[in-house]
Structures are given as C-alpha cells and as structure tokens.
Image (cartoon, rainbow, N blue to C red):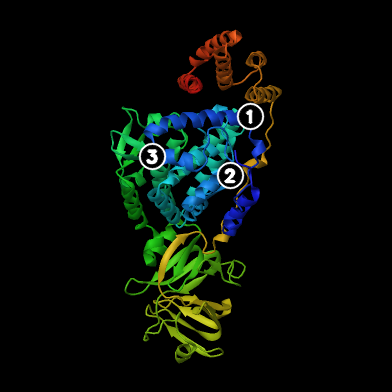
C-alpha cells in the first residue's frame, strides 16, 4: 500500500472552484474498521471475479490502473495517482450531493467519491453512496476515453438543467433516508419515517411535469448508473450501480430479465433507488449514448435560450439564469417574459432576490441586497441602428445620446422604451453590460409601465438577445450548502467492539480456534467472519495441523446452517465458499 500524502489531495481540492471545495471532506482513514476492510475485500474480490467475464473491458483495466486493490480500502491519493493519467481526479464527499453539484464535479472531470464504507448489513446493496460504489463502480470505466467524454458531457448538461422545488424535495428525502438506513445506530421507526417522507416527495414530483433536471437524471440513471452495452442477448456491464453490486450485476444479465434497446424513451421512465431495477437499457455503442444525450440537450433551455428558454424557467419556478449574448447573466426566479407584436421576446422580469453576473462572476454591487425585489431588463437590439449596445464604442454611444448627465430615450426594436438620465455605464472586458439611469421610465410594447422614476435607479441590460437559460445562479459560488452525514456520532456496543477486535486479531494471524471460541457468544451478523475463520482453518489443515480440519468442518456446518436463512444469505455464503476455494487453490 502506498503511503498517504495528504498534501497531494489538498492540492486537488485547492484547484477546484470555491463552491465545489465546500463539499469536499478529508479521508479519515482510521474511521474504517476492521469489519469495513473485511467487507471491502470480500466485495471487491467477488466483483472482480464476475466482471472480468461480464463487465466492459474498461472495468478490469480500471481496477488495475486506478488502485482498486481488493486487499484494502483505497487511499484517495492512490486513486488520484491513476486518474491523473487520464486527466481526471477524485475528491471525497459526504454522502449524497445535490444533483447539480454532482453533475458539476463531472463537468470539471472530477469524480466525487463518498468517504463512507457500507456496513456488512448492506454488503449486497447500500442505500447510501459509499466508496465501493464510487471507487469500484464509477472510477474503473474512466479507463475508456469515449466513456470519459460522455460522462463529462452529461455533467456539463446536468449542471445547467432547470429544476423545480419538487426535485429538491426528493433530493432532501433521499439523503435523509440514506443517512437513516446506513447509520449503525438507526432504528426501524426512523427508517420508516424517512421512507414515508421519500414516498411523499416522489409522489409530489411525479404529479408535476418532469423538470429538465429530472429528465437528465433519468438518462444518467439508465446509462451511467445502470447501463449495459453491446447486444441485447449478451451485453457487457458498464453502469456503476451494476459494477458495484454483487447481486444486481448478475440479475441484469439473467435470461428472464427484461433488457431494452437504449433510446431517448428512457428519459420518460422513472426509477426507484430503493429496489432492484425492473429492466435495463442496452446501448449499441458509446456513440448512441451521445446521440440520446444530444436529443435531450436540444430540448433544454440552456440550448434553446430566447423566449422559449425564459418560459421554461418560469414554468420550473426556481432559481435560474438568463444569459445575454454579451455574457451578462440575470439570476432570479423568472415571472414574466413579455413579447412584442411579432411574438419575439421583448422584456424579462424576476421576482424576489436577484443578482447579476458576467460570464460566471458576480457583478460588484448587484447582488440580492441591491435587487431584493426583482430585476427587469429589455431584450434585443435598438431600433433604427445597426450599432450593438454591448459592442458600441464611447463615440458610438454618444451618437445614440448615451452620455453621462444626458437625458436619453432608447427605443428597442420590440417597442420597449427606456427614457432617463444617464448616470454611469459598466464595462467588463471591453463589453458594455449595464447602463445606469436616474429619473427613468420604462414602458412595454403595449404601453404598460415597467419601471417608473420613483422606484430608484434603473440598471438597463445592454446584452442583446438571450442566448441561454440555465438552472441556478450565474456565479456558481452562490449554490447551496448541505449538512454533514458525519455530524451524527456512531456508538458501538460492547459486542460490536469485541467483534471488531476479533476481526483485527484474525487478520494479524491469531489462532482461529481462539477467535472462533470468542466469536460464538456474540450477537450480530457473523457469516463473513465465520468465512474468514473457515479459510484460516483450511490453511492450517493444509499445513498439516490436524485441529485445522476439525475447526473447518465445524465452521462449515455453521455456515451451511446460516445459508438457509434467506436467498441473499445463500448467495453470499456460496460466493464466500468459492472465494476461499479459489484462494487456497492459488496458494497450493
């Protein structure tokens, strides 16, 4: 195992945009228990064995290249050493991220990896993101250049989609449920309450038209998380949810499992994060993934812009940004998109706290404190001139009457009229972005007053047409924060602490007979520890220690009894026996 170099990881974090840095956490490697390490070894060993035959070739290559070692939970610097070769990096995060943040990490070629490790209770499937799902599920496929490009494009699109408040409700409920289910001290009442909250949030979301963010999330789910590629009869696995799942990786390839050809229809298909998927989509090749993504992106406001884009933002009803051709960005909750006699967009307004930015950087003096009640601005070009306001020189502006201290009347092609006394003009990187006027009156094409002198100073956008409308603020540093999963302490019982000691002692070579004798009276799920004792006993037997054979027979009988408790337990114990036999054969 390579030595941990925390300074390397801190340099990775320091290179991120400030708002993304706030979601990163340190890897508290000592928090991983001996049981965690044992669970990792079992899961990764069995995944590698299965995926070497049924996974996309990039999976096996990625395991080798990106330090996905079955022997131990990887240090973040180990993963980054491999990812650097393909132009990506990884950061550790705290459980479920807001979807737009997750997508933005991907857009920056950063893989967010949950720092948590699944418990033994959730060895088959974890309700919360964990290092198995992220490091062993998402990371390996980055070995394929075409897939990397697709993943980044999904991130770029996802970071700009519009969402509604129902989407946020589902995210908050999913996060709460995952915390409740995976926390060692969670009780059934807490989990049931969280599940009811999620069901209600999902019902509310599905009662409304699907947002752009929901449609993109569905594509992400059916491809990045649960995607197959190749032929319908014999596809290969590439989706991270399948790559990291012992059971579902097998289920998706079963003869009686429904597999459908990938098409844009997948974005109309809702999904359930709490259960095995009812069907899976199979892509012909990587290009088809991009084709479906392009079909979806073409429907989104960030590509459409203009009147339709602003109307989409109004329909979604949450924070969005309209971007002018000169890079000026108006952020707020859009409530009106006025049109002229030709049906073209003439004027936009927001309601409530609003702010301005240019090309992703907040414009000084134009945050929500300056615009607490909304913002309004004309769209389009001036009438009677070919001069573009955003590109006009001081001389050209003067010829239009735009001079400090001078009263001017500006008539737009839409028939919006702005009349007032020029106070100042803001320029950013040689572009005119805002014209400030006092004693200003603004009228709509139909004569309606949009701004009047006693409202204060008017800040007129000088951007021309609206070229894009996207979710969230122009300055991404204004995105929200979240609470930490780590804020809730873990309390281990005396029995759990004793079992932890036994895991470690057996790993260090203690007599398996002694470990077994101490393990027997302890309560809890013991099958994996019993499997380790069984393996240790067989190794002793192979070394001509007679007591090893006796212990192996006793433990095997106990495992066979546990095997009958459930289908899942039977699967896990059978896989455990295969693992032990394979390891013994390799050392014979």
Q: Regarding mark 2 in the picture, which secondary structure is present there?
A: helix
Residue 502 visible in the picture: yes
Instruction: Determine crowd level at label 3: few under 14, some 14-19, many 20+ residues with C-alpha closer than 10 A.
Output: some
The x and y percentages for residue 116 are 59, 38
The x and y percentages for residue 430 are 50, 80
* Left or right of residue 522, residue 385 in this image: left
For the residue pair 256 and 218, the one nearer the viewer reads as 256
State the mark number for residue 135: none
125 to 327, vertically: above or below: above
Q: Which residue is found at the position 45% from the left and 58% from the top?
A: 160
281 to 19, vertically: above or below: above
Instruction: Determine crowd level at label 1: few under 14, some 14-19, many 20+ residues with C-alpha closer than 10 A.
Output: some
Q: Earlier in the sequence, mark 2 or mark 3?
A: 3
Residue marked by disc 2: 76
Residue marked by disc 3: 57
Q: Earlier in the sequence, mark 1 or mark 2?
A: 1
State the mark number for residue 34: 1
The nearer-to-camera label among 3 and 1 is 3
Q: Regarding mark 1 in the picture, which secondary structure is present there?
A: helix
Which corner quadrant holds the N terminus? Answer: top right
The x and y percentages for residue 576 are 50, 21
For the residue pair 294 and 113, the one nearer the viewer reads as 113
- Occupied quadrant, residue 550: top right
430 to 561, vertically: above or below: below
176 to 454, vertically: above or below: above
Using the numbered discs, state the Cα–Cα distance from disc 3 to disc 1 in whole angstroms: 31 Å
Q: Seen from this angle, which residue lies furthest right?
A: 494
For the residue pair 73 and 470, the one nearer the viewer reads as 73
Q: Which residue is found at the position 38% from the left and 32% from the top?
A: 53
Q: Earlier in the sequence, mark 3 or mark 1?
A: 1
Using the numbered discs, state the Cα–Cα distance from disc 2 to disc 3 in whole angstroms: 24 Å
For the residue pair 428 and 270, the one nearer the viewer reads as 428
């Amino acid at each position: 195992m390579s030595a941990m170099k925390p300074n390397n990881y801190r340099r990775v974090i320091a290179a991120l945009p400030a708002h993304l840095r706030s979601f990163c956490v340190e890897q508290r490697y000592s928090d991983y228990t001996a049981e965690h390490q044992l669970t990792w070894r079992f899961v990764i060993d069995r995944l590698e064995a299965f995926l070497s035959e049924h996974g996309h070739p990039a999976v096996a290559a990625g395991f080798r290249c990106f330090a996905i070692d079955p022997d131990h939970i990887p240090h973040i610097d180990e993963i980054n050493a491999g990812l650097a070769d393909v132009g990506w990096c990884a950061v550790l995060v705290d459980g479920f991220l807001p979807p737009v943040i997750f997508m933005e990490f991907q857009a920056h070629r950063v893989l967010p990896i949950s720092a948590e490790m699944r418990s033994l209770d959730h060895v088959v499937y974890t309700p919360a993101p964990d290092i198995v799902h992220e490091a062993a599920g998402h990371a390996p496929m980055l070995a394929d250049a075409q897939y990397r490009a697709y993943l980044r494009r999904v991130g770029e699109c996802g970071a700009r989609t519009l969402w509604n408040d129902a989407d946020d409700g589902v995210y908050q409920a999913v996060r709460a449920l995952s915390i409740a289910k995976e926390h060692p001290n969670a009780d059934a009442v807490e989990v049931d309450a969280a599940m009811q909250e999620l069901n209600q949030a999902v019902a509310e979301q599905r009662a409304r038209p699907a947002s752009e963010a929901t449609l993109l999330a569905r594509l992400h789910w059916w491809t990045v998380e649960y995607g197959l590629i190749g032929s319908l009869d014999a596809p290969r696995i590439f989706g991270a949810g399948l790559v990291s799942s012992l059971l579902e990786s097998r289920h998706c390839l079963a003869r009686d499992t429904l597999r459908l050809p990938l098409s844009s229809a997948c974005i109309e298909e809702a999904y359930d994060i709490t259960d095995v998927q009812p069907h899976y989509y199979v892509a012909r090749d990587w290009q088809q993934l991009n084709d479906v993504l392009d079909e979806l992106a073409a429907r989104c406001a960030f590509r459409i812009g203009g009147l339709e884009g602003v109307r989409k933002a109004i329909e979604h009803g949450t924070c969005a940004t309209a971007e002018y051709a000169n890079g000026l960005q108006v952020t707020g909750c859009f409530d009106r998109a006025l049109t002229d006699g030709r049906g073209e967009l003439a004027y936009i307004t927001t309601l409530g706290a609003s702010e301005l930015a240019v090309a992703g950087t907040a414009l000084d003096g134009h945050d929500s404190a300056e615009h607490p009640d909304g913002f309004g601005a004309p769209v389009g070009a001036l009438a009677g001139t070919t001069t573009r306001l955003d590109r006009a020189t001081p001389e050209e502006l003067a010829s239009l009457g735009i001079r400090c201290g001078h009263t001017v009347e500006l008539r737009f092609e839409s028939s919006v009229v702005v009349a007032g006394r020029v106070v100042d003009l803001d320029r950013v990187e040689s572009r005119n972005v805002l014209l400030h006027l006092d004693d200003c009156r603004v009228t709509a094409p139909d004569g309606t007053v949009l701004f009047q002198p006693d409202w204060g100073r008017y800040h007129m956008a000088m951007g021309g047409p609206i070229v894009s409308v996207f979710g969230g603020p122009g300055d991404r540093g204004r995105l929200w924060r979240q609470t930490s999963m780590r804020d809730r302490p873990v309390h281990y019982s005396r029995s759990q602490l004793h079992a932890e000691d036994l895991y470690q002692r057996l790993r260090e070579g203690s007599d398996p007979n002694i470990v077994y004798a101490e393990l027997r009276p302890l309560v809890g799920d013991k099958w994996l520890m019993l499997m380790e004792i069984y393996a240790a006993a067989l190794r002793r037997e192979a070394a001509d220690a007679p007591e090893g054979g006796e212990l192996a027979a006793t433990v095997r009988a106990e495992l066979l009894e546990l095997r009958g408790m459930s289908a899942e337990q039977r699967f896990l114990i059978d896989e455990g026996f295969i693992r032990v036999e394979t390891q013994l054969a390799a050392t014979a």
